[in-house]
Amino acid sequence: MLQLTADRLLADVESLPHALRLREVARAAHRLAGQNQLSPLLDELATGGPYEQRIAALAALAGRQLPYLSRRLTDPDPVVRRYAHRAVCELPLPDEVVEQAIRTAPTAVRGELIRAVLKAGRTAVAERLVPVARERWGSAEAGRLLPVCSPAFVARELPGLAHAVTFTRSLGERHPAAVLDEAERRLTELPRAERAGFWRQNAVGLGAAAGRLPGRALDLLELHPARQYRPTFPAPLRDRFAALAALDPERTARVLVAAGRGRHDPVLRPALARRLAAAPLPLLAELAHRSSADHAALSRQLPPAARVVLHDAVLAVSKAYPRGYSGEVLATLPAPERIARARARLAEDPEALDLLVHLPAAEALPRLMAETRTAELWERGYAWGQVVVQAAQSGASSAVREALVLLQRLRNEQDPVRAEALAEVAAVPPKLLEDDAAGLLARLTEDALTARDCSPYTRTQLALLACSVLAEHAGGTARELVDWAVRTIERIAPATPAFPRGRQAAVAAELRPALERSSPLLLAFVDGLHPASRRLPFLVEILEHVTADDREFGRAVTHLLADTATRGERVARLVGAEPAAAALPAVQAVLTRERTDLLGPLLASGSSTPGGLAPVPLDLTAADRWTDRQVRSAAEAVARTVDDTTATPEQRTTALRAAAHLPGHGRDLLLRYVDCADVLLSEAALAALPWTARPAEALPVLLGYVGDERARVAVYAAGRAARFTPADELGPALARIVTDPTTKVTSRKQAVRLAAAHLPLPEATALLEAAYRAPEQHQDVRRVVVEQVVARPADLPLWDVLTEIAESTSELRTVLAGELRPHALPADDRRRYAELVGRLALAEDSLVASMGAGRLAVWGRYAPEAVAATVPLVTDLTERERWRPAARALSAIAWSDAPHPFGGVAPGSLLEQTLSRLIEAVRAGGPADDEGRDEAARQRIEQFSSGHFHMTETTAESRARARAVAALLMTEPSLVPQAVPRLWHAIDLNSATLGDELGELAAVLTDRPLLAGKVAEELRPEDDRTPPGEHTSAAVRRLTEDGGLAAGLFAVRLVALYGPGQEWPAEWRAALHALRRHPQADVRDRALGIWTAKE
């Protein structure tokens, strides 16, 4: 048997399409491997160009040649590398081979190999690489390998990597226990203010873990609420709540209602609502009363009788009738209950027109028809729409027909009125429209479309209505209705929406004559079809005969080629009949990716564009699927375009950039132009070089321009090349640049960034330090060094450089006050960085001190002595500039959950010490105003009270702190105005001790009527949907009986807050009348301004 040579193999497959060519090579390789004849062929192919080497890699994979593939794991060619990486997943490549390849691979190739290891699930390789990756490339890179590691390994290693790891979906799904355990540890460790960010950042992985271990996730959500400081749950976590509710509906409901200021999450999904319906009624009522949409969603999942019970329970909780009587909620109730409740509400509020639709037609229509004759345009439109809604609500076809009869009166109405009515008709369930409604609909359609003011919105509503009717009745007996729908759709094409998938074939059959007549309708109809429905034989036949303008022809071709099973053969016929069709994007996509055997004539002649000029003969992004002859032909065509001086500069540069996609030949063409006198062509060539198949080969060329005017293009293009360059080549090249003072600053800065991103950490750290300490180094380069270190201090531990900067007067100190968060550092490094921030807060430069103090609020808990050192900045009245940011930091820390004496306001705490010294200064009197100062200490206390010293949350602990601050301030009578805001912020209107708390505040304000009035206006409940309790009524009575001005104003405020929401029951009316007889005139005046009913 003759041995198969490389030339013969390549000749045999030269004329085949791409996929068939690969199959034939694989078959030949498999056969030769069985005969032990494959190795000579591989050796011969490997000596060729890119095309031959790729064929060799494919043959090696098909023939299971492990030694050959092992040597190609880090090959410069991406296609060769891709075949080798498939071997990692499909063949038993030794673990040590894969590990060694990852150790030595450049950044981009390492990422590809790690993805292959993850895809293959090679646990042994991953576990061996984690410590290596952490040492060489950082904890974040090591964390990427965790999903395929064993559970015991992840549980052991995750805590040490947690500062750099974001929980991913794969990690959460494969190791839910370890993820949730680590989440609990980190949430316990984090300050309260940082926890919301943790949930948001890790929501994807935590949501995946919750789906696997819902009980454990519920434990975590109860211990550390995910909605702390946020109105919504992160979406990936919220999507798993159905799984949590399936396990325990009651606990899940409690998690959903835990936020005190209300839910702002999307409406409960049916799966979640169905499972939550098993929760206790009081919990469901608490959940439902916060949102009428959630109420309706829950109600739909309950039996009819239980819906009524839930409705009444919600009303009892909220006392908010408009919410409880929303139309969406009432629509879920049984008819008798719905009608009774709508009547009751209308008796109380005759203006609630939206409730009329829930009444029988005999009751609702007279009122609605009266509203259709009002002068206001929008009111008439709303009323006509409600006429239709009421008919549809009845569920009777006869009622809908009667409504259509009434709508005939719209002929002479304005378009907004007509459009509102048609929108509601389009929303009617089409099964309620019978054949006898066709004439009425035809009249409505004619009146609307022939009106001079017919709007696109009206046309859209008619299209929706016609499509809804056709989808329901296609193939049925209602022929007049179907005929009307077909005529309407044809008349208003192409505004044709999609049809339900199960009805698309029947709809297409009804529309066939119209589709044959109208290309725009045909294309609009096919646009909305499911891909499977586009294969209907008669639709394909119609599409093949579209001969309208070029745009419609292109859309038709796109639809024809959507079928992957037939598009190869269809393109061959299309190009054979009309060569110019190759210029269509859909045709090019098939030619360049699948039917590569048809490329020859097109590559030789160029694309059929006006004037015969082709900037790019074809789409070259898939040129790695072509034979070497085809690539060479394309390169010649590109070269002709680039060399053509009659072409526009844009055409020439576009062609040159596209050359990067041509394996081998493209790089040669780009190198011809890098030194071109034409700046546009030269820079285009430089920018395209790293996008060739072998970016690493471009790096020396690009770095050769770092010292001239081309540097602005070359150094940034080098960024991509560096990702593919091995570290032993990249490191020396970058080291020469960063320490050379003659190199442009832009080049040195980019070299620093590339070193930090792509070199192993020990080498990167050394290079960055050398760049920082280089003699005559530009300050901007040093700044970039510091930025890189501050962004990753755990990976680039140049602590001596950071300390040196913090202790200097350098402007680089501002870089240290960056956005780095404590949880992004290992626990051992947090104190070290916090001490640096503390030094900044004490800097003499006010800008640096301000930035440092701002970051001290975040970092201070890790270096308490640094925070204590800022107290004199506030209490020393000779300090004129730095006290303000220090005060902001102290107040933020005091109201955080930091431990005493660092946080809080207990005796001995930093804040207590600061305020005590300032109060003493107030008593002693400050600098005289003739010195340019006036009440300095008082102004600093005012600064604390007015803005920077505020509660970030209202908890029992924060209220206690506010009262402690107020008590401290009131030791000096002149500071009562600064103390009072703390007192009223500390009052909880839902507290059982409300009367005592307001009474004490009123006593403080006895001689301060203006302040009392201001405080009264500021009183408001934390959650305005929580009804008042007996304690509220008792507080009103007590305050009224007090007789004082402040107490009376507080009582009036409570009555104003809660009386209207309770619909003014007798108890609250009596309280209001008593306040109108109050001994204080201001109280009487305010009470008389509150009315139980409006005229």
Image (spheres, grey):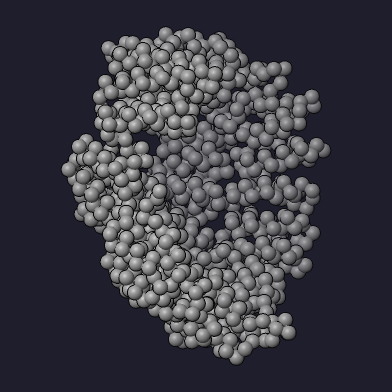
Q: Is residue 536 above or below residue 757?
A: above
Give the position of the N terminus as an image quadrant. Answer: top left
The answer to whether any part of residue 949 appears in the image is no
Residue at the spot 69% in from the left edge and 30% down from the top edge:
655
Which residue is at the far bottom?
924
Which residue is at the far right?
677
Classify residue 532 by image quadrant: top left
Q: Is residue 802 above or below residue 418?
A: below
Residue at the spot 19% in from the left edge and 45% down from the top edge:
306
Q: Nearer the viewer, residue 311 or 1092?
A: 1092
Q: Is residue 217 above or below residue 30?
A: below
Residue 531: percent from the left, percent from the top? 41, 24
In the rendered structure, the answer to whether residue 724 lies left or right of residue 216 reads right
In the rendered structure, the answer to whether residue 350 lies left or right of residue 48 reads left
Residue 394: percent from the left, percent from the top? 26, 29
Classify residue 770 by image quadrant: bottom right
Residue at the spot 50% in from the left edge and 15% down from the top edge:
450
The answer to whether any part of residue 821 appears in the image is yes
In the rendered structure, the answer to whether residue 849 lies left or right of residue 900 reads right
Residue 957: percent from the left, percent from the top? 38, 74
Residue at the spot 54% in from the left edge and 18% down from the top edge:
452
